[in-house]
């Protein structure tokens, strides 16, 4: 039995991720948590006819603890609301507000499911991973193999932008892969187009444009 808990399941990323997990044959139980919307998302997804337990929880009635109890994998997508929250003008502002939200969730993970694999999607993920690690260390629940930052989006963007420039969108998913190194930020992220055979058809100006965009 594999149980996955999605924290922040009511947000845009959380809802889309929850849908994908609902369709996965590898997930036996899906627990969705959000301050207010997760219960509704769970009801909608429960209408998909698959053999999987799904429940939605919110902050009342000890919802977070219920969502985390018995979880094998915890995926954190929660963060400050773009629509209702404060205007975030820098990554430092984003970190300040995200840390308050993610920190409390990570602390609950350390208490309720200390052996679970924790995957952080929330931004800025570069800073939130070491922040989460320190919280877990204080709870004697830190395992470097079980705390991950999810940056797959960088790879997906790089592959899509390359295909758009080459006019080969139909070839996406057919083995054309772009490795991305560095941290998940515009200052440190580097898509390695030099290792992609199709990218060698591009001029240096096109490559510069592509790297800056990705």
Image: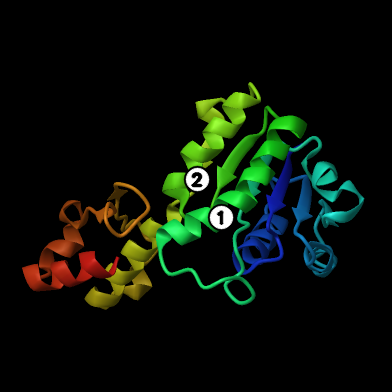
According to the picture, the residue beneath numbered tag 1 turns out to be: 98
Q: Residues within 10 Å of mark 1 (few under 14, many from 20)?
A: many
| Image x and y of residue 68, in percent | 77, 41
Instruction: Give the quarter of the image for residue 170.
Output: bottom left
In the picture shown, does residue 176 fall above or below 202?
Answer: above
Residue ID for mark 2: 128
Which of the two residues, 171 or 59, is positioned nearer the viewer here?
59
Mark 2: which secondary structure?
helix
Mark 2 nearby-residue class (10 Å; few <14, some 14–19, many ≥20): many
Q: Residue furthest left?
A: 204
Q: Is residue 70 left or right of residue 151?
A: right
Whether residues under marks 2 and 1 lie with C-beta atoms below 8 angstroms apart, the answer is yes
Which numbered disc, 2 or 1, marks the residue that appears first in the sequence?
Answer: 1
What residue sits 30% from the left and 76% below the top? 164
Q: How is the image coloured?
A: rainbow
Identify the residue at image location x=23%, y=74%: 166
Quarter of the image where the N terminus is located: top right
Residue 74 visible, this angle? no
For the question of whether residue 75 can be seen, the reply is yes
Residue 108: percent from left, percent from top? 73, 39
Where is residue 47 drawn, in percent x and y? 84, 68
């Amino acid at each position: 039995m594999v149980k996955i808990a999605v924290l922040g399941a009511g947000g845009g990323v959380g809802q889309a991720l929850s849908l994908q997990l609902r369709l996965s044959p590898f997930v036996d139980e899906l627990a969705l948590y959000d301050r207010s919307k997760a219960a509704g998302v769970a009801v909608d997804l429960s209408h998909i006819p698959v053999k999987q337990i799904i429940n939605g929880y919110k902050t009342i009635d000890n919802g977070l603890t219920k969502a985390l109890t018995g979880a094998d994998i915890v995926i954190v997508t929660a963060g400050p609301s773009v629509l209702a929250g404060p205007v975030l003008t820098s990554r430092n502002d984003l970190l300040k507000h995200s840390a308050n939200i993610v920190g409390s969730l990570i602390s609950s993970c350390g208490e309720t499911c200390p052996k679970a694999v924790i995957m952080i999607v929330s931004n800025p993920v570069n800073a939130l991973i070491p922040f989460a690690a320190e919280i877990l260390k204080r709870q004697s629940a830190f395992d470097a193999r079980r705390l991950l930052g999810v940056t797959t989006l960088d790879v997906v963007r790089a592959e899509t932008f390359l295909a758009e420039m080459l006019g080969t969108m139909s070839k996406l998913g057919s083995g054309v892969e772009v490795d991305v190194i560095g941290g998940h930020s515009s200052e440190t992220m580097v898509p390695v187009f030099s290792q992609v055979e199709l990218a060698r058809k591009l001029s240096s100006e096109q490559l510069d444009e592509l790297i800056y965009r990705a």
